[in-house]
Amino acid sequence: MSQHRPTGPNGRSGGVPALPDLPEATVARLPEYLRALHHIAETGNDTISSEGLAAAAGVNSAKLRKDLSHLGSYGTRGVGYDVALLIDQIEFTLGLTQRRAVALVGVGNLGHALAGYAGFASRGFRIAALFDADQARVGEPINGLDVRHISELATVAAAESIAIGVIATPAAAAQDVADALVAAGVTSILNFAPCVLSVPEGVDVRKVDLAIELQILSFHEHRKSALTSLPGGLAEEAVGT
Amino acid sequence: MSQHRPTGPNGRSGGVPALPDLPEATVARLPEYLRALHHIAETGNDTISSEGLAAAAGVNSAKLRKDLSHLGSYGTRGVGYDVALLIDQIEFTLGLTQRRAVALVGVGNLGHALAGYAGFASRGFRIAALFDADQARVGEPINGLDVRHISELATVAAAESIAIGVIATPAAAAQDVADALVAAGVTSILNFAPCVLSVPEGVDVRKVDLAIELQILSFHEHRKSALTSLPGGLAEEAVGT
DNA sequence: TAGATTGTTAATCGATTAACAATC
DNA sequence: TAGATTGTTAATCGATTAACAATC
């Protein structure tokens, strides 16, 4: 999913503040904790136990504490975590202290929806530019931004300091778009096209494939219906804890 | 992410055809192999090696062979895999031999795009009904389907044999929608709302949170820029293989 | 102090990978 | 037969979890 460069055993020389190595599984959960913490903050709580936060994030509390211990020691034994402090720590770790500019390529069905998705803005990102290869769409205003032609990518990316790109094109176009993004200096790509992208070392790719999510659910449906049709009683038994 | 019931050590009595236990990580990759295989089939190849398929799916070949070995032995040593046969096997395993009916709840920005997403139809699913809580949207035709009021969920789900639901509502509404889906007999949910759902045992939930994907990328951006700003040379060194 | 809760340890579990014997 | 490639083994690695000592 994400091309990942091992950061090595932190073998550094200078007195630079060390960014600790975080397990990838932990990194993937931090945003969930952050979302839960914002929710908790909104309800007026300024302290939360690992048990409470874990419940809000849908994980078990041992895992949560283990995850947070990688960031440092920001809880108080016998009390819990200071919500505001923990929000700050996680936001810092995720690099969300600056609002990051994002380029969105492909303003079809899905791209159009993503361009208007309020969750990006509220959670640390700014859609800074929209691109499409179709001249007929260039100039079209979406959510306050005019769609630009893909050929302008490099210029705009430089001008807006864009390091993150979102691909919402058909699969057939995605690799070319990825190449263009990389050429424009983008080093992180979120790919909604159902295909594998090849990118140089140092560029991170994450993929969201909507049909794959349904197919995974389909697998479990298939299992569930197979169990149901077994001779009496077995279904319950096999479902276990 | 997905509430998962361990299926137990296959402890069965009767002579029912055994569905082998598959590691969850393998299940999550099968759809990717399937997509790659369809692509390979379209290019006219009827045989593919593990090396070739692995490359097309973006994984290493040892992992691919290990994954496929869980389904049984469908390759030929010295030759490779029969593309059509493997497609059939994976589709069977994923329960894609029947086209599955899906209910989509919430036809805002994102829901609208999902309702029109061709990838669902082409990869085993049929959006059978659209729902919204907003009476103003009820009756609106989207992609050949009229939006219905959420109160009709149970009736329609039964009539259309819907077992899979997609939630594309605001977070605040998502839990109520999930409850309604479960009450209507839905046993698999794909949740696009940024919140944790609580569902009964036996119901599977998968979650897609678009902002979380960007936040994970942001983390890596943060790391990369920290490395870049280190005193000369270290950046290259730390990036490693 | 007594009660609560963190941070850490250590055991367990599952996933990945390289290597290679089996076999086409 | 020789070459190619699978399916499996076994070692390694990373993630999860329960338990509890540390400490507020």
Image (cartoon, coloured by chain):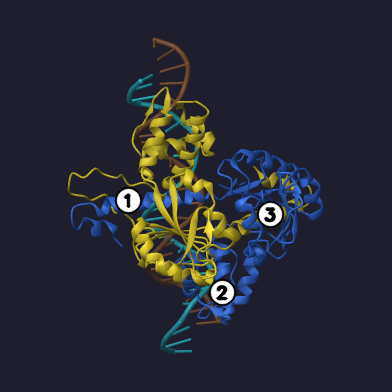
Chain colours: A blue, B yellow, C cyan, D brown
Q: Residues within 10 Å of mark 1 (few under 14, many from 20)?
A: some
Amino acid type at image mark 1 = Arg
Measured along the vertical axis of the image, is residue B97 above or below residue A115? above
Host chain of mark 2: A
Locate the C terminus of chain A and report the quarter of the image it occupies.
Answer: bottom left
Q: Quadrant of residue B150?
A: bottom left
Measured along the vertical axis of the image, is residue D9 above or below residue A41? above
Q: Is residue B187 left or right of residue A39?
A: left
Measured along the vertical axis of the image, is residue D10 above or below residue A57? above
Host chain of mark 1: A
Which residue has dot 3 on it? B221
Q: Position of residue B156 (x, y in %)?
A: 38, 61
Numbered disc 2: secondary structure: helix
Dot placed on the residue nearer the N-terminal end, 2 or 1: 2
Q: Nearer the viewer, residue B229 or A9?
A: B229
Numbered disc 3: secondary structure: helix
Measured along the vertical axis of the image, is residue A65 above or below residue C19? below
Q: Disc number at residue A223?
A: 1
Amino acid type at image mark 3 = Glu
Q: Disc number at residue A39?
A: 2
Question: Spatial distance from mark 1 to mark 3, Cα to Cα?
Answer: 40 Å
